[in-house]
Amino acid sequence: MEVNLSINFCGVKFPNPFIVSQVPPIGNVEIVASQLQAGWGGVVLRKTSLNATPDKHTIAYQRQRAPLYRGVEYEEKRLTDLGWIEPLTPAPLEETGRAITILKERFPEHVIIASMIGANREEWLKVSRRLHQAGADLIECDFSIALGESPEEREIIAHDLKLMEKAARYIREGARSTPVMLKLPGMIPDRGMVIETLKEAGADALTLFYEPRGVPGINLTNFVPFPNVGGKSSICVMGGAATKPYTLGMLAEWGVANTGLAISALGGAYNWRDSVEFILIGASVLQLHGAVLQRGVGLVDELKSGVSDYLEEKMISSVDKLVGKSLPFFSLSKDLPRNSAVVAAIDEKLCSRCGICYRICEGLGYNAIGISSQRKTSVDKKKCVGDGLCVAACPVAGCMSLRRISR
Amino acid sequence: MSNMPKVIKGFSEETQTISYPEAIEEASRCYLCWDAPCQKDSPTKTDIAGFISRICSRNFRGALRLIKETNYFPGITSRVSPYDEQCEEVCLRKKFGGPIKIAELERLLADCDRNSKHPYLPEIPESIGKTVAIVGSGPTGLAAAVELVLNGCKVIIYESSRVAGGVFTKGIPSYLISDAVISHEIQGVLDLGVDLVTGINVGESINLMSLKHSYNALLLTIGLGIPRRLDIPGADKGDIFTGVEILESLKLKEKRLRLGENVVVAGGGNISIDVAAALRKLGVGEVTLLYRRGREQMPVFRKRYELCEKNGVQILFCTVLKEIISDGQGTITGVVCQKTELKEEEGPTIVAIPVEGSEFKLSADTVIFSIGQRLDKRLIELFNLELTEKGRIKVDPETNQTRDPFIFAAGSCVERVDSVIDAIAKGQSAARKIVRELLKE
């Protein structure tokens, strides 16, 4: 069965839903070209702004030789998450314009997303117009930041609905026929209202991301939080595999409120399974950053093969049929159909006899799992409440499950 | 060039310790089972899952402390005791990618402690005003001393030889464990305030009366001091040694051994295979080991047996030594062996019965007896103690007391001890019983 991975995203055709997101401080045309060469469906270029000078900031950051990133590790699992101090180093508009033209010539089939920031009418209009002229397939404007000296002092456009509407209109005007995508922090309130307003203002799509601010950890020797920049630290932007459940939850909340904007999700997807989950919960395309840094541009082969093998097995002909498929299953917790009953079941062939399920059930006070002198565990169906904590704690995949029983 | 003295340079330890990243990865494989079977199977009841989870969270000092609370000699035991047949054997991850390498994790912690500026030293509780004398400074004696100190007793150890440690210092070839590890862990005992007197024969230099006068209890952990020899024709002359002698001279380097190029080792215990492997490592041309039963009956550690095989020791099962042939000058020229037949008898024992007419000759120039040791009876007679029919000291299993309630005994002089960790566990248990008895008074 031929599986179709291409996806139509507000009129733009992506060969596959996987996008590499470029994050400052460094980015050049050759790196982007190599990513498209490797088979990524599209790229998001570095943010550009009207008044950016040629890489003044980049040079400053490089000369500084100061840490920006800090991995989060949990016991032996390294880099479960990543925190970084975001440097604001927008690329100059002309440079970006030239890069778009070069890339578009070399990769006409791939999607080049130009990313911009702006703070006033002139910036929104001029930048979007230039990007449109250069031939960008999509223009993304980041509403999660506005110009300011440091992230803490910046005014976030996304916190002001009126301002957002105004900005969206100007960008729409400047971008002409090019679809416009607005990048919002996923945790802002009044989602239905935001969607309606932005749609009205002419937006075609949203990029949603869950990037809570965080501290990746603290050095227990000298008490300085990570990353240590000359003995001081700053609260970071967090991203990475550990944010996946939060991104999923955020997407679900937007997805339920959504009425026709295409959604692009950023952050938290590390493998094809994550990607399918993101798509099922309403994202049409995915922007990846941390995973690409960690695994290299070749990661896209793994993602594509994972998703197409999955589709083939499920006998689904194309990936766009999956978009939002899980959203109808959400319900308020009070409306959950609680009359269907399940109890825990143990696969004896797989059981390692570790007794962890016994310990957990005893700890919860249900005492529904018994253990014999040979360490064989068994479920007392009368006592089991089917809450599934034992299933979650069992170290052997597939050994424990919840089975439906008739009441 | 046979029978030239072999200069023993000593071996250097061949164990390799895993690195911290590896250790954390290995530790995180642990299920942290409920009622962990590894702890149950550990002779000292060490909280293995506990120390592993501390490694996971990188609390290495805490992990070591947890081990040392129940086993004061982790550096030694993790090298020489058969963890692969004890706690690792019952590890529930065995089926799922192999057992957790408990010995290696423990060794890493112990080595780290040894190299640290402030090695672990437990807090010593308030004195209960009792003093216990221990005779013999082997694993049982040392472990008992630690346990007694940690229960508030004052301890003095008497050791007949010049160096303390018993089997630690004399019975383990250096390629398994370096002297630095042993001396560090023995020093750890002395750091607790235990007095050690070496080169003294209790009973002769100090009599029982004066012992009773100075101490509240006496613990005999004298082990089995005298190596057995086979009583066969020709066993009285020529280059005939015992396994214990060989191991001892390998460790105490001043002794020179006159070993030939063609050695026959009689016996199939751990000492026998250690001796055989060590001799091969020294460069002895041919080493043949004779054991009267089969491989399954051989009471040896799996890993040590593999080491023995790897070093090219020729092992003849179901074979006994019948006669040693020597020429007129008393030089051994060969041995006569006899095949045996295995017969199951009542109980778990399998008896080897020699087969008539199956004798065969082997050429040899050196013979080593390594068929076990027996109790040194001198002290037993002096103290007028009772013996069991197996020739060990008879004690009350409840209290470890001998016929004389002042005298306690523990370790291999009382019962069969399989490994160093087993001996440590026996010493600890005896010490707890002594404290209990002393507090009764």
Image (cartoon, rainbow, N blue to C red):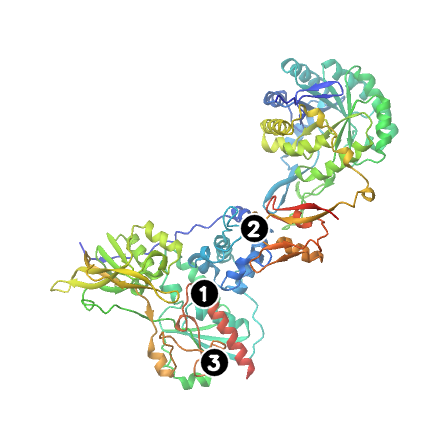
Closer to the camera in the image, B420 or A5: A5
Q: Quadrant of residue B166?
A: bottom left
Tags 1 and 3 touching, CB below 8 Å: no
Residue B73: percent from left, percent from top: 47, 62
Question: How far is the residue under mark 1 from the one under mark 3?
Answer: 23 Å
Picture quarter with the N terminus of chain A: top right
Q: Are marks 2 and 1 on the same chain?
A: no
Q: Is residue A197 above or below residue B350?
A: above
Q: Amino acid at mark 1?
A: Asp
Tag 2 residue: A352
Evaluate whether residue B292 shows in this view: no
Tags 2 and 1 touching, CB below 8 Å: no
Q: Quadrant of residue A129?
A: top right
Q: Amino acid at mark 3?
A: Ala
Q: Earlier in the sequence, mark 1 or mark 3?
A: 3
Tag 1 residue: B422
Closer to the camera in the image, A153 or A17: A17
Residue A162: percent from left, percent from top: 88, 28
Q: Identify the residue at the far left of this view.
A: B328
Tag 3 residue: B217
Which is more foreground, mark 3 or mark 2? 2
Chain under disc 3: B
